[in-house]
Structure formats: C-alpha cells, structure tokens
Image: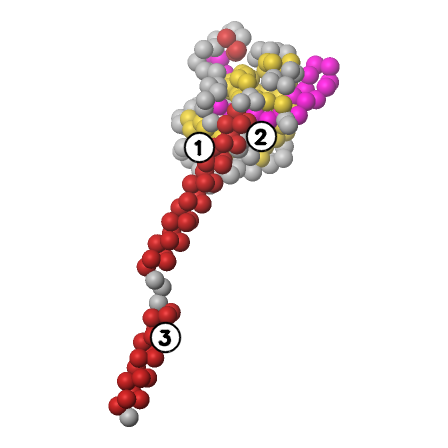
Amino acid sequence: MKIESTVSLAIALACFASFTPQPARAQSMTGQAAVNTSTTSTVDSAIAQQQAALMVSAKIHLVKALDARKAQPGSQFEATLDGTVHLKNGTELPRGTVLIGTVAAGEMQSAGASHLALRFTQAKLKDGKVIPIQATITGIAGPPTEGGYAGDDQSLPSWNPGSLQTDQEGTILGVDLHSKIAGVNSGEFVSSGNDDVKLAAGSRMSLAIAAQS
C-alpha cells in the first residue's frame, strides 16, 4: 500500500508540473511580442518616409469657419492656396486653387475634450478640373490681425520634409493639433479645455501635400 501511495503521489506531481507555465517559455513569448511591436513601428515609419518624399510644402487659409459642435462627419469644407504649388508629379496648383476636404471621424479619444478631424481629398482648379490629393496639416495660426496677404505671414513656418509627425499644443484659443504623415486624416484638433474646437474663417494652415497615388 505504501508503494502504491508513493507511485500515485509521483504521478500527481508530474501532471502538475506539466501544466505549470515555464518561465523560460514565458520569457521567450514576451520577447517575441516586443520584436513584433518594434517591427510594426519600423514599417510604419518607412511608409511615412516614402510618402513624405512625394510631398511638398503649401500654405492655405480656411474659406469659412469650422465649429466641432456643428460640423458633422462627411460634411465638406474649403480652403484656398496662398501661393502656387508644384506637386512632385508635375501638376501645378496655382494660387487661389480651392482645396476641398471633409470632416472626418476622429482617431484620438480624450474624455470630455472637443474633437475636430479634417481630411483633404481634392484640389479644384479655376477651370473646374478636380485633382485627387492627400495632405497633412503641419501647422495652424489664426487669421491675420492686419490687412495683407496671409501667405506673406512668417508666423506660420513651412513644413520641414524631415518631419513625419506634428503635435502642436495651444495653437489657437486652447486648441491642440495632432497629425501624421501617412495618417488616415489630414489632422485632428483637440480642445485642451472645456470649450468646443472652433477654427475661424481665414485661419491659416501649413500643409505637406501630394497628388493622390
């Protein structure tokens, strides 16, 4: 009986050990997960760099005001180029070209904050020709306080081709700007306070822009 009890105990201990996670295995899986995350980040960065190589700098101003409380996803808005832009594919967008965009669903979530996501999709020339575009908002400033051409204002720096992401805090009236080259949206504005995001008519933006491939 003693021998049978000893054998039974040994079998029970062996079964328990077989179902117990092994530290070495857990460490291996954790390491693999870290490698996968790093690889994904590297791939995203490479895609952004490829798209940035196709983009050029531009400056625009909003035709009409935008209010996050009133703007519905899918509704259109317009902005106007402050100067002639030569896209990398050879297309020329003259000064005064209208850029058409849509209000989009925001990718960022922040409890209690007001959001306004924008996505530029088209450039409409004066002859009516429409050119598909992709654009990233790389900076914003309010309307000029004095008379003059908005494109001459030096307070809104042009896009730096080496910049793949913009996180601009307190841009105008407590509004933060977040954008990424190769992002789904051109940019997202988030209120840093309790007020709604409001962009006044004439607000100026710097862009990284390219023809839609």
- Kindly report the distance in space between the C-alpha atoms of the residues bearing marks 2 and 1: 18 Å
The amino acid marked with disc number 2 is Arg
Viewport quadrant of the C terminus: top right
Q: Is residue 158 visible?
A: yes
**Residue at which label 1 appears:** 191
**Which circle, 2 or 1, is nearer the viewer?**
2
Q: Main secondary structure of the magenta part?
A: strand
Q: Which one is in front, 153 or 144?
A: 153
**Residue at which label 3 appears:** 15
The residue depicted at 47 percent of the width and 40 percent of the height is 40
Residue range of the region highlighted in magenta in the rendering? 123-145
Q: Position of residue 125 (x, y in %)?
A: 69, 16
Query: Per the image, is 141 magenta?
Result: yes
Could you say whether the residue bearing mark 2 is in a helix, strand or loop? strand
**Residue at which label 2 appears:** 119
Q: Is residue 147 left or right of residue 74?
A: left
Could you say whether the residue bearing mark 1 is in a helix, strand or loop? strand
The residue depicted at 47 percent of the width and 10 percent of the height is 153
The amino acid marked with disc number 1 is Ser
Q: Is residue 3 left or right of residue 161?
A: left
Q: Earlier in the sequence, mark 3 or mark 1?
A: 3
Q: Position of residue 192 (x, y in %)?
A: 40, 32
Q: Position of residue 115 (x, y in %)?
A: 49, 35
